[in-house]
Image: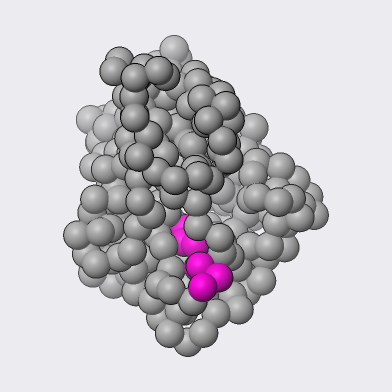
Amino acid sequence: MKVAVLYGGVSAEREVSLSSGKGIIEALQKRGHEVVGIDFNPAHLDEIMKLDVDMVYIGLHGRFGEDGKVQALLDMLNIPYVGSGVQGSALAMDKAKAKLFFARDGARVAQQQVLFKHSYDSKQTEITLPFPIVVKPNQEGSTIGITFAHNQDELRDGIDQAFELDETVLLEEFINGKEVTVAVMGNRGKEKALPVVEIVPKNKYYDYEAKYGAGMSEHIVPARLSNEQTAYVQKYAVLAHQALGCDIYSRVDFLVPEDGSDPVILEVNTLPGMTPTSLYPDAAREIGLSYDEMIEELVKLSLNKYK
């Protein structure tokens, strides 16, 4: 097939997307496809409007890629693409709203408080969560803009920093535990959870450096969880994927508390990283799919929904 790969983009996750795009392009070429690579920029939509391809693989991360906007454009142009549509993409990108769907299905979510730039006042707004508090932009990925506040000064600085990236800021209770993630794959109604991946960062927290720096985190597959914990995160990963209306693939992040209580679902990533150090390829490898085979499988699954 002739496949266009959209990568790069203009979000804070551009560098990650450049790496993902390179891997996706090489994998598709090795599988015999004719590939057109496009470093996507919303100011140059004519590149997309003129596309004459069989399929688009979206290798973007963050805004103008993972939030449903590109998907809406491709829908209007009647161009098939890999992955989730407009609704699933937009809902998953909005962490605060997505958590309402997770809780509705019975998953445990972290206590949260949502702040809006238009109404937030550092002197008047009451923060109801106890320290430490996790501060994050509501619609950024790759841990960009996330800080951990242990006192009022750190909280104020973290909120200000997060507001530089987003109009909405999410405050969450800090939960001490191990980070795990569950890859989900399949057409609607046939989604399966892949083996759970445990993330052991070299840094104190699983931050941007730990996520993308070579050797800065260890991925253990399958994760060192009890059978009950494994079943829990796999079950709620699929339910979260379905509740948001996601399609083909996603990666769902959890925290497993040290106290043995139920795992906490954090977010759904509809366009998970596909870099050499990314988690989704690790999970696929555990079920016997090489990186190239995984990319090909996602293309095939996506073709099914357009039949």
Q: Residue at x 27, y 32 (%)?
A: 72
* Residue that extends furthest to the bottom in the rendered view of this protein: 227
Q: Residue at x 37, y 34 (%)?
A: 127
Residue 305 in magenta stretch: no
* Depicted 95 relative to depicted 185: above or below: above
Q: Which residues are magenta?
A: 252-259
Which image quadrant for residue 114? top left
Depth check: 61 or 248 in front?
61
* Depicted 258 relative to depicted 242: above or below: below
Is residue 302 among the parts visible in the rendering? no
Depth check: 122 or 47 in front?
122
Depth check: 210 or 49 in front?
210
Is residue 168 among the parts visible in the rendering? yes
Callout count: 0
Q: Quadrant of the C terminus?
A: bottom left
Could you tell whether 190 is left or right of 154 in the image? left
* Residue that extends furthest to the top in the rendered view of this protein: 43
Depth check: 299 or 141 in front?
141
Q: Residue at x 44, y 12 (%)?
A: 43
Model colouring: one colour
* Depicted 262 relative to depicted 48: above or below: below
Q: Residue at x 56, y 35 (%)?
A: 151
**Residue 92 screen position, x and y as percent:** 34, 45
* Depicted 307 relative to depicted 53: above or below: below
* Residue that extends furthest to the left in the rendered view of this protein: 104
Could you tell whether 65 is left or right of 142 in the image? left
**Residue 182 screen position, x and y as percent:** 47, 66
Residue 254 in magenta stretch: yes
**Residue 212 screen position, x and y as percent:** 69, 45
Classified by dominant secondary structure, the portion drawn in magenta counts as strand
